[in-house]
Image (tube, grey):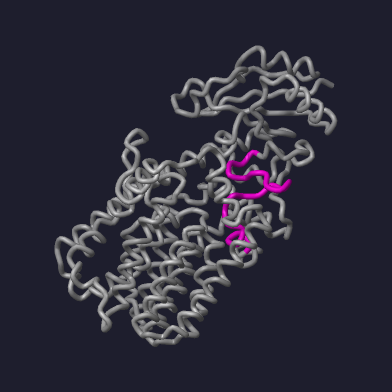
Amino acid sequence: MSRKDFNLLFIFFVSILCLQLFLSAKNSFISDSLAKAFQIESAKTLKSDIIYPANLLDAKKNHHPVLFIIKNKEELKSVFSQTFASIYAFIFYFIPVQLMLFFNGFFLLLSAYTLNRYANISVKVSILLFVCSIVLTQVIDLSEVPFTLFYVSLCYALWTKSIQQKNEFLTAITLLLFVLGSFLRLEILLLSSLVFLNSMIQTSLDKSFKNGFLYLISYTLAISIFLIWNYHEFGHPFGIRYLFNYSTGSNLTLISRVSNLFHILFSGNPTLGFKFGFFLFSPYFIYLCIKYWKQMYPKKENYIISFHFIVFLIYPILVGLSAPNDGITITGRYALFTIIPGIFILNHFWDKIKSDKFFLTLLLFSFFLNIFVLKISKESFKMIKKTNKIYESFKADLWIFYDQNISGTAGVHLLTQKSLSFQEFSDIEKRKQLLEVLKKNQIKSVYTFDFSKTVPNSFMNLKREIELSNVDFVKFWELEGYTCHSYQEVAFIGYRQCSLKE
């Protein structure tokens, strides 16, 4: 690697770090990233169960306050990759989870380096596509995306090198590693399967059926390890994420699958506000494919670029048809790893297209679209920071949240604060059981939270059978020996404190 490339990578890493600091990304712990924080901190303890400060108050483990942490085989587990959590817990053992996200840029740097080192991909091209694609918005907060992108880049680069050099042993090893990457994200199972398909096509072109048998063994072994381990650990061969996504009435019809595909590749559901899918986020890819369509057909002297086209065109379609939804918050994120074959394609045609004004205009469009999305993220992180400061003033033995949508706003406070997500205040039996447990464990002070009823929001407008502000809420606490203070609201949070009578 040249000194110029090294300097470019260093500037890129520092730029990502400065961007995260500017966005106040340290305050982004809500929803997905909060569940991952719990998972990583739990992995540091070498216990399979997720951290639960209020564990003694919830013997059946039905009321963990964090969204995406569920009960599986009588243990609390996150629906996200345990492999990712274990790797981060090991690498960053002495680093607070709030600071781990600041290493995202380092893994992007490693991605660009490995693509250059093993596949001779221009560092400039890699960085350009990281910045002008959906990748940038997905590596700001705590996520498995940066490390997984590095892992996929490494596997894809080594696989390309092995195909070019006709190194059948290296091809078999990379196929094995590629499939095992499915432990990081389930979509990699589809990506690695397409890489396997290309490997088999290559053996057919070279009439090397012995190599084909070797590749089949490598692929089958890796698939077997993945399926058997998941079934043993989570009770389903595709793992806990699959169980979570498809066990809640998500029996997708053909129409809904096609709809998801369209949203993921092009645009989101307009009823939730227009969102950009993968190819509208990065329209230059469509232009690139159309411009060089004639060169994508397999030719023996140039079949490597054809392999990249096969993966690039088929992978996002398979992802879109198999996805449980359209990505909801950011459509197109399920197809994120399409960026890797896309980098290889753009690098191949770079000299021909780098001076194309229309292509450069499309790149600028993607860059400014990223800026727009990041601006929204900054406002979101600013709001979370304010909310976290509000929670700091609520000192009590226990926090109770009406549901996990409101509890997520407390962020990393939930790592140490005893907290429950409890919606059954209208159920007399469950309510009495809860209060008995609280008194048994000498819980003297309790804050109960719900969304404000005066601030308009889809979550906040939920109607409860027993509202936090209602006199009925006070009555049943008083019957159990607690005194409740008046209902209060601050920002979008409604709360009431109840204390055990002396």
Which quadrant of the figure contains the N terminus? Answer: bottom left
Is 48 on the left-hand or right-hand side of 82? Answer: right
Is 260 on the left-hand or right-hand side of 173? Answer: left
Measured from the top left, where is residue 454 in percent x and y?
A: 48, 20
Q: Looking at the image, which residue is at 51% across and 56% down?
A: 143
Write down the quadrant of residue 114 in the picture.
Answer: bottom left
Question: Which one is nearer the viewer's eye here, 272 or 107?
Answer: 272
Q: Looking at the image, which residue is at 34% across and 74% down?
A: 123
Which quadrant of the figure contains the C terminus? Answer: top right
Read off the magenta span: 65-86
Does residue 105 lie above or below 414 as drawn? below
Q: Is residue 137 visible?
A: yes
Does residue 417 lie above or below 210 as drawn? above
Question: Which one is nearer the viewer's eye here, 66 or 62?
Answer: 62
Does the magenta portion include 322?
Answer: no
So how many labels did they put on this image?
A: 0
Q: Looking at the image, which residue is at 60% across and 61% down?
A: 227
Does residue 455 lie above or below 203 as drawn? above
Measured from the top left, where is residue 401 in percent x and y?
A: 63, 31
Does residue 314 lie above or below 435 as drawn? below
Is 79 on the left-hand or right-hand side of 342? Answer: right
Q: Is residue 127 visible?
A: no
Q: Looking at the image, which residue is at 68% across and 54% down?
A: 42
Measured from the top left, where is residue 241 in percent x and y?
A: 56, 51
